[in-house]
């Protein structure tokens, strides 16, 4: 079939569903194109200089409430991967009169600049690429305009490419070609995602189709998008190179031309008068009878709020009986939606309930005294065991992973910038030479997150949270078999040892090993090669588990060592704030381990005290971002040393520091200040009281900041950890100052995590609550699955006003990556809730 004209394509679409809409997109006050059912961001979100292409940047479409398109920009590959070069936005012009937004993009490494203009016209958009200078010869056949489409939004949907039918595959099985590496545009800092086995090659995906007119999902009026250009366009499946790839439509920029070198016409179909379905947000784990119970209902700004909502009780025969109909209370606008609240706190009868708002009815949830009794069990029983490093982990018939990283670790080289935020300066700060083996590190520790590195900072946080939980609550739950001798873990198998102590022991073993063998804690231990780092699956195959032996050739082994340089590197630069963080962690772990593993408890204190003495007399070296970030670790170390030793020198140092820190940053230090109450006197408590009152004023302000009344973060990583830690802080504050801080703030934080949050009402803890995260960014993300008990980061803000947590696409780590420190904080919060309820 020949090329359809733009008009004919529009008629074809109209004929198929009869609901063509002619509304025009308009640049709004937030500087993006807005229409009913279609929003277009033009570099409201820039490519990230830290994690590069996070699939949250460039030209982005929010189509009937779902972000389905991003990555619109001049790009240098058919399907750019995360670490391919990204353009920097040099400037952005928003022209409300002409209804257009123009950006200037620069590849600094290649000194290549282009401009992209997006203009709303009639019922669509025109995207124009402009060049002031002809393409550099090196980028001919490489630079093009790309737009990326979310695979899961188009699964089981079709397309018409110049009328030729096709469908979007569930799983990639396209064609690729091998090219010599001399033709490759180097990835970030010379790293490479491709393991070419020494052959000097790289891969390029071939197109699924080539066309001048593409209709995506003609059958689905909510997803239908039409693209048209006189320059040929090609459709690619990025997943052939990287599991987190998207479907990419691309036109190459012509060689030897300047001015307007490329133009696309784009139309997003929209349903007339479309209104987003409301979200009724509530705790998926349910509520205990006595607590506040408030559902937050999120409404499209074009929606007219209903007057009332109703709570029904569901009986054994499946019948629903109305128990409460009440007015919904308007809260107002937050970000892009309006909010109303439905308060059903008066309902206290145990049972199953649903909320009805208009035609919309929620899934059932419970009101019962027991609803929070088990909410940390999946995290402690399953998620933490699966994260355990240097162990084989079994669960019934399934091996989660074999025994990994027996080849840990070698000294990282100096002056090196790694791709996961690690770096080395000009010295090692150890007695080891670059690449020299550091003995004793193949023990203990956890995989930091969905990747497999040991991050010492998060280990410290885990140890502090779990030790606090043990000291306060003494929960001796035992559902995991952990044998350090044979390096074997078996899930759902008691071994007469409290799991929480076994986890504290496991983390402590690695931190102590760092202090003994290196002399101080290290920033982290991680694979050196980018082609290893994106590993998905069993951790035991990320390295070959054999120590590197330079006498052998790559991929050659003598059975005891290998010639493949894949051993993890220890990033060893000494960071004083990290030292103090580890001192705090080890001093607190030593109390938890006192009877359980007396030798390890002693080692903790020997190392912690040694480090404290050394750091007292050392000039600070905290010029790193990491070092500056953690301003509160010395005061934590002083407190934990004092609690363990009762040696007055530590209390003196604690008191010297804490008041100034509270004045500087109340939020970051109030938890530590509250934790000191049991070991200090009334004078301290009296002096702290005004700070707790100030903290409570901040609690009150949160209820005005957003309808959920919790601290929602607006940074590049969503903020569930912050919400959990805030709830824990409120638990401490309520425990020691119940007249100032009420229990409801602890429950507010808890219920936010369990479903009462923006975007959806899913519980952010996999398998906790009636509906919970089924897709997360764990090491099994390529299978679109989860690890039970993982807590995701939550709702990520895409600037300027779109909060998102995708449930059909696991690969956005800012939304879906579970990390160990959050898991430990969740265990602590859950047990604190249990304590609140058991000791009213
Ligand atoms: Ca990591
Ligand atoms: Ca156990
Ligand atoms: Ca190795």
Image (cartoon, rainbow, N blue to C red):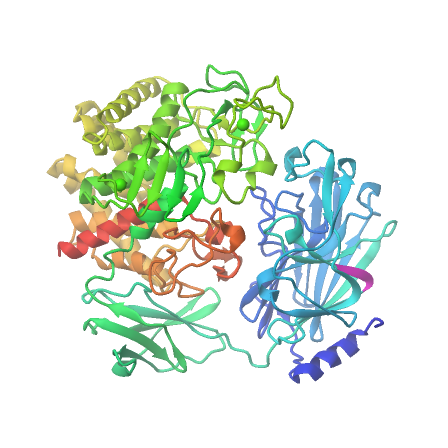
Left or right, 270 with respect to 575, comes to right
- Residue 169 is covered by the magenta coloring: no
Lateral position of residue 186 relative to residue 466, left or right: right
The residue range painted magenta reads: 230-234
Image quadrant holding the N terminus, namely: bottom right
Along the line of sight, the residue nearer the viewer: 535 or 420 = 535
Tell me the quarter of the image containing the C terminus: bottom left
Residue farthest toward the left in the current orientation of the protein: 682
Q: Which secondary structure dominates the residues rendered in magenta?
A: strand
Q: Is residue 822 visible?
A: no
Q: Position of residue 153 (x, y in %)?
A: 58, 65
Ligand 2 shown in quarter: top left
- Judge whether 307 appears above or below 141 on screen: below
Q: Residue at x 52, y 16 (%)?
A: 433
Which residue extends farthest top? 431
Residue pictured at 44% horizontal, 53% vertical? 786
Counting from the top left corner in percent of width and height, residue 712 is at 40, 55
Is 155 rendered above or below residue 596? below
Q: Is residue 227 visible?
A: yes
Is 436 positioned to the left or the right of 125 in the image? left
Q: Position of residue 19 (x, y in %)?
A: 64, 83
> Number of numbered discs present?
0
The residue located at (30%, 63%) in the rendering is 285
């Amino acid at each position: 079939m020949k090329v359809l004209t733009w008009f004919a394509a529009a008629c074809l679409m109209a004929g198929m569903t009869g609901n063509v809409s002619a509304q025009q997109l308009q640049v709004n006050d937030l500087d993006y194109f807005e229409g009913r059912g279609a929003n277009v961001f033009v570099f409201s979100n820039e490519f990230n200089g830290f994690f590069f292409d996070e699939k949250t940047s460039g030209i982005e479409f929010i189509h009937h409430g779902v972000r389905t398109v991003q990555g619109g920009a001049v790009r240098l590959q058919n399907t750019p991967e995360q670490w391919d070069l990204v353009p920097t936005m040099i400037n952005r012009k928003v022209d409300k009169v002409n209804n257009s937004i123009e950006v200037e993009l620069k590849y600094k490494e290649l000194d290549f600049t282009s401009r992209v203009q997006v203009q709303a016209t009639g019922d669509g958009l025109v995207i124009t690429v402009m060049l002031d200078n002809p393409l550099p010869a090196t980028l001919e056949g490489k630079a093009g305009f790309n737009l990326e489409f979310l695979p899961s939004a188009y699964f089981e949907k079709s397309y018409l490419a110049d009328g030729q039918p096709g469908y979007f595959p569930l799983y990639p099985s396209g064609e690729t070609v091998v090219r010599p590496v001399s033709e490759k545009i180097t990835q970030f800092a010379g790293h490479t995602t491709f393991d070419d086995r020494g052959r000097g090659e790289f891969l390029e995906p071939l197109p699924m189709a080539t066309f001048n007119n593409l209709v995506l999902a003609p059958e689905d009026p909510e997803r239908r998008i039409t693209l048209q250009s006189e320059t040929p366009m090609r459709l690619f499946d990025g997943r052939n190179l990287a599991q987190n790839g998207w479907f990419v439509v691309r036109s190459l920029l012509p060689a030897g031309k300047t001015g307007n070198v490329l133009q696309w016409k784009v139309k997003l179909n929209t349903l007339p008068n479309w209104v987003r379905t409301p979200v009724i947000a509530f705790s998926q784990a349910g509520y205990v009878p006595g607590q506040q119970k408030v559902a937050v209902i999120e409404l499209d700004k074009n929606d007219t709020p209903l007057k009332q909502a109703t709570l029904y009780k569901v009986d054994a025969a499946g019948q629903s009986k109305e128990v409460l109909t009440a007015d919904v209370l308007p809260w107002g606008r937050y970000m892009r939606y309006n909010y109303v609240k439905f308060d059903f706190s008066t309902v206290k009868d145990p049972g199953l309930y649903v909320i009805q708002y208009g035609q919309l009815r929620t899934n059932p949830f419970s009101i019962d005294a027991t609803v929070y009794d088990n909410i940390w069990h999946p995290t402690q029983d399953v998620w933490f065991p699966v994260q355990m490093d240097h162990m084989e982990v079994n669960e019934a018939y399934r091996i989660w992973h074999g025994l990994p990283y027996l080849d840990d670790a070698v000294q990282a080289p100096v002056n090196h910038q790694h791709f996961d935020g690690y770096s080395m300066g000009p010295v090692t700060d150890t007695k080891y030479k670059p690449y020299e083996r550091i003995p004793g590190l193949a023990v203990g520790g956890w995989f930091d997150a969905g990747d497999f590195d040991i991050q010492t900072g998060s280990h410290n946080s885990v140890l502090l949270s779990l030790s606090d939980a043990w000291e306060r609550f003494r929960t001796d739950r035992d559902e995991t078999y952990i044998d350090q001798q044979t390096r074997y873990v078996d899930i759902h198998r008691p071994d007469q040892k409290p799991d929480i102590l076994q986890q504290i022991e496991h983390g402590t073993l690695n931190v102590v090993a760092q202090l003994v063998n290196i002399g101080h804690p290290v920033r982290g231990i991680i694979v050196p090669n980018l082609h290893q780092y994106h590993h998905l699956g069993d951790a035991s195959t990320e390295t070959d588990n054999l120590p590197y032996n330079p006498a052998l050739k790559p991929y050659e082994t003598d059975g005891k060592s290998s010639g493949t340089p894949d051993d993890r590197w220890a990033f060893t630069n000494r960071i004083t704030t990290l030292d103090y963080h580890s001192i705090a962690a080890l001093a607190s772990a030593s109390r938890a381990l006192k009877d359980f593993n007396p030798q390890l408890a002693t080692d903790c204190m020997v190392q912690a005290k040694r480090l404290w003495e050394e750091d007292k007399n050392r000039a600070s070296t905290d010029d790193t971002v990491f070092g500056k970030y953690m301003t509160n670790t010395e005061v934590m170390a002083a407190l934990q040393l004092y609690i363990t030793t009762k040696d007055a020198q530590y209390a003196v140092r604690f008191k010297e520091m804490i008041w100034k820190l509270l004045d500087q940053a109340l939020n970051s230090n109030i938890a530590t200040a509250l934790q000191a109450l049991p070991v200090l006197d009334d004078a301290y408590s009296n002096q702290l009281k005004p700070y707790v009152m100030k903290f409570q004023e901040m609690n009150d302000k949160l209820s005005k900041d957003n309808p959920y009344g919790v601290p929602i973060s607006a940074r590049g990583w969503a903020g569930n950890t912050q919400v959990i830690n805030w709830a824990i802080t409120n638990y401490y504050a309520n425990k020691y100052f119940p007249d100032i801080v009420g229990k409801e703030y602890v429950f507010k934080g808890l219920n936010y995590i369990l479903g009462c949050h923006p975007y959806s009402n899913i519980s952010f803890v996999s398998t906790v609550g009636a509906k919970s995260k089924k897709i997360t960014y764990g090491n099994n993300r390529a299978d679109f699955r989860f690890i039970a008990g993982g807590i995701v980061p939550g709702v990520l803000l895409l600037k300027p006003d779109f909060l998102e947590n995708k449930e059909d696409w696991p690969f956005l780590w800012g939304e879906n990556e579970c990390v160990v420190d959050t898991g430990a904080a969740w265990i602590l919060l859950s047990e604190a809730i249990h304590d609140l309820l058991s000791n009213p």
